Image (tube, helix red, strand yellow):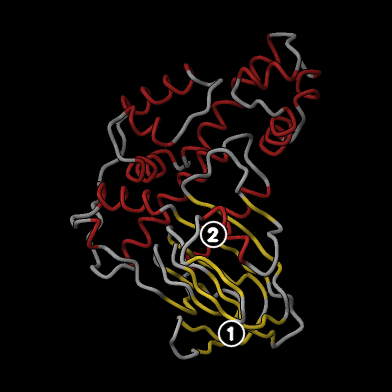
Amino acid sequence: MEIWAIKEIIIPHSVTTPDFERYLPTTPVLSSREVIGWESVMVRAYHEPAILEETLFPGGPDIYLVLVTSGHVEASERKIGGPWITYDIHAGDWYLTPAGGEPYALRWKCLSDEPLKTLHLHLNADLFAQTAQQVTDRDPARMMIVERSGLQDPLLTHIGLSLQQELQHPAADLSQLYAATAAQMLAAHLLRHYTTTNPRIREYSYKLSSRQLQRLTTFIHAHLDQSLSLEMLARQIGFSPYHFARLFRETTGESPHQFVLRQRLTAAKRLLKETDLPLADVALRVGIPNQSHFTQAFKRRLGTTPHAYRQER
């Protein structure tokens, strides 16, 4: 394995995405590492030190994005053997590194009393290539992400903060579906705006038919007690995950995970009214094995708890 050293600290040239956090100056305050179903995008949030001395970071196999969510710092970065490049960094700035990036050295110091906080996204490189193959007119092998620093992108910020919020408050065991949908949107956005070839994204101008929606609804109801992935839903009507998620929202006004959650809560209401099943069993039957998540989602959507709703019958 090729290794790099700086100030007697030795690191590998490249590490896996799960292992990358071992080389960061602090441990994450929030992480999707142990969350089942977030393989398409790994999300971590950090409270960073006010001063970082020269530190070496390895490369990684996935597309790496960092959003500064709070703070104002002066940061300097350099490739191995290259000159230092200094940036004035503010909240809202993004830093984009292609998959397979080289190791680099970084140092910074805060310029304000506001704490430095960052959000890190690792977009799976295989998912990016698969999305490129499905939605563009170019060879995925020729589409390279362009490295960017100090980037301001409102849509990118919306996607990143939405993922962070979902990780903080998961929507009734539907976070897998949410993360997969967001990863598809993220991949398409990067393809459209941050690649060397500027590919054309194939889009459909029509909406899903009533027959397609009925087929999806029937499938969801038949598998309501199971984990439903974006790929599984898209396969029912023959679309790529990206096009399915986009057309579904345009047709229904809801994202796939919002629609599935609504179907689950509707089924839960019926079971609460018509049966005496324990709340834990009701939650299991509608595909929400975590009773706490079930209660939170029910109250968030309906303004009352499952127990109180049952008492009203």
In the rendered image, which residue does mark 1 sit on?
75
Query: Which kind of residue does numbered mark 1 sit on?
Result: Ala
Residue closest to the eye, 287 or 77:
77
- Residue 141 versus residue 302 in the image, above or below: below
Where does the image place residue 283, in percent across and percent down from the top left?
A: 67, 22
Q: Residues within 10 Å of mark 2 (few under 14, many from 20)?
A: many
Residue drawn at x 39%, y 35% is 231
Which of the 4 image quadrants contains residue 273? top right
Where does the image place residue 51, in percent across and percent down from the top left?
A: 71, 82
Query: Which kind of residue does numbered mark 2 sit on?
Result: Gly
User: Is residue 298 in sight in this rendering?
Assistant: yes
- Residue 205 versus residue 265 in the image, above or below: below
Left/right placement of residue 82 relative to residue 176 reads: left
User: Is residue 203 in sight in this rendering?
Assistant: no
Where does the image place residue 228, in percent across and percent down from the top left?
A: 48, 29
- Residue 127 versus residue 71 in the image, above or below: above
Residue drawn at x 35%, y 45% is 242
Which of the 4 image quadrants contains residue 44? bottom right
In the rendered image, which residue does mark 2 sit on?
160
Residue closest to the eye, 99 or 166:
99
